[in-house]
Amino acid sequence: MINIGIFGATGYTGFETVKLMRKHPAVQLVFATSESSAGGNLHDLYPVDWDIPLIAAADAPLDKVEAVFCCLPHGASMPAVIAARQANVRVIDLSADFRLNDSQIYQKWYGLPHASPDLLPTSVYGLTEIYRTKIKETNLLANPGCYPTTILLALYPLLQANLLEPSAPIIADSKSGISGAGRKATLKTHFVEVNENLSPYNIGQTHRHVAEIVQLINELGGVGDALIFSPHLVPISRGMLSTVYVSLNRDFTAETVQQLYTATYAAQPMVWVLPSGQLATMAHTQHTNLAALSVTLVKPRQLVICSTIDNLGKGAAGQAIQNFNVMFGLTEDLGLV
Ligand SMILES: NC(=O)c1ccc[n+]([C@@H]2O[C@H](COP(=O)([O-])OP(=O)(O)OC[C@H]3O[C@@H](n4cnc5c(N)ncnc54)[C@H](OP(=O)(O)O)[C@@H]3O)[C@@H](O)[C@H]2O)c1
């Protein structure tokens, strides 16, 4: 058994990680942390009968675990990650703290100085389908954001074959369930504001996830600055869908573009390319660790990709466990299907 700890077990991603890990056959949960409920139990906060005591992050027994999941807000994650790495514990960080290569870019987007720029070159971006080889070796896994997961999986077959028209925009129109904003209530996310409503926010190049998506598009040979990102909140608990509009640099037919996506993801257990004529919906992936993609060719050089995940599944806890499995040489979907 592999001993693990979960920082931030009381949040939405932390609770999802606990829920999945309780059924994972190769794992023993050693500790779970909370700041505001340290000394309490997870069953005081969620309608479950599991006996999971909560401790403060500072009291985490890092000498008793081989890996930790950091399900903490950005900024709060850095001290936990640094302490875990100092104790030689492998880290899967769900926050944005170790996703960006450049500490100055991190400070620009997240508004605080990075506490450990020296660790940034050691972190691996955990989009499993793209970086599996590096993930196997890493001790610091930066789990991707949920929006970036949908958008990058939609673009990857085109980026890797250099098929995007560099002068054209990449337009990602994205919808997220409210759990994407975390458990703490805010004015923007409370029931009356979101119920029977659909709200765009941070349109263009202003949402924090832009930094990460641009970094990855550039790294994969595309033009990151071409991104126009329009996120929306939809009044559902969980689920995410990005509709991505791109221009291609050569002519395709519906059959050849379908073949490109099917072939790219043929060996990927967590990516489901829908048959031609079907469209990916949130219901294809809710409560799973799957990403579902559908491709619609509008004109020979204009393509629309629908890309959907569960924001707490492939967008957070599920992908984190998928990456954990890869890091520890386990079957990739262990505990996830
Ligand atoms: N929600 C999503 O769909 C999603 C998807 C991908 C990535 N993420 C990322 O995953 C991370 C967690 O997100 P979430 O949605 O699970 O957030 P959340 O529901 O707000 O939970 C945050 C957790 O962190 C703990 N915490 C808060 N401040 C802390 C501090 N200063 N020190 C230590 N612990 C602290 C909270 O503990 P107490 O409240 O018990 O004190 C809680 O357990 C974030 O970085 C987020 O960006 C979220």
Image (cartoon, grey):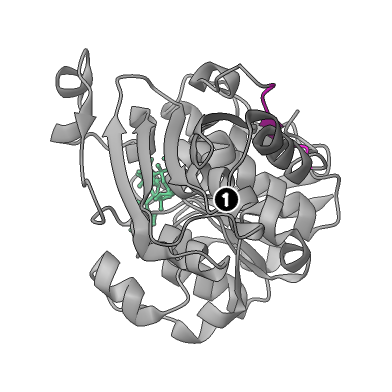
Residue 155 seen in render: yes
What residue is pinned by disc 1? 250
Can you name the residue that lies furthest to the top here?
196
Residue 53 seen in render: no
Q: Main secondary structure of the magenta part?
A: loop
Q: Is residue 180 left or right of residue 286?
A: left
- Tell me the magenta residue range: 268-275
Tell me the residue at 45%/25% (across/down).
46
Helix or strand or loop: what does disc 1 sit on? loop
Mark 1, residues whose alpha carbon is within 10 Å: few (<14), some, or many (≥20)?
Answer: few
Quarter residue 12 falls in: top left
In the rendered image, residue 75, in percent from the top left (x then y), is placed at 35, 65
In the rendered image, residue 220, in percent from the top left (x then y), is placed at 58, 65
Tell me the residue at 45%/70% (across/down).
100
Give the answer, above or below, for where 261 lies relative to 61: above
Residue 331 included in the magenta stretch of the image: no
Residue 272 included in the magenta stretch of the image: yes
Q: Is residue 213 left or right of residue 257?
A: left
Tell me the residue at 57%/50% (across/down).
250
- Of the 4 image quadrants, the one containing the C terminus is top right
Tell me which amino acid carries mark 1: Arg
In the foreground, 268 or 43: 268
Give the answer, above or below, for where 88 lies relative to 185: below
In the foreground, 8 or 295: 295
In the rendered image, residue 63, in percent from the top left (x then y), is placed at 68, 69
In the rendered image, residue 211, in percent from the top left (x then y), is placed at 37, 63
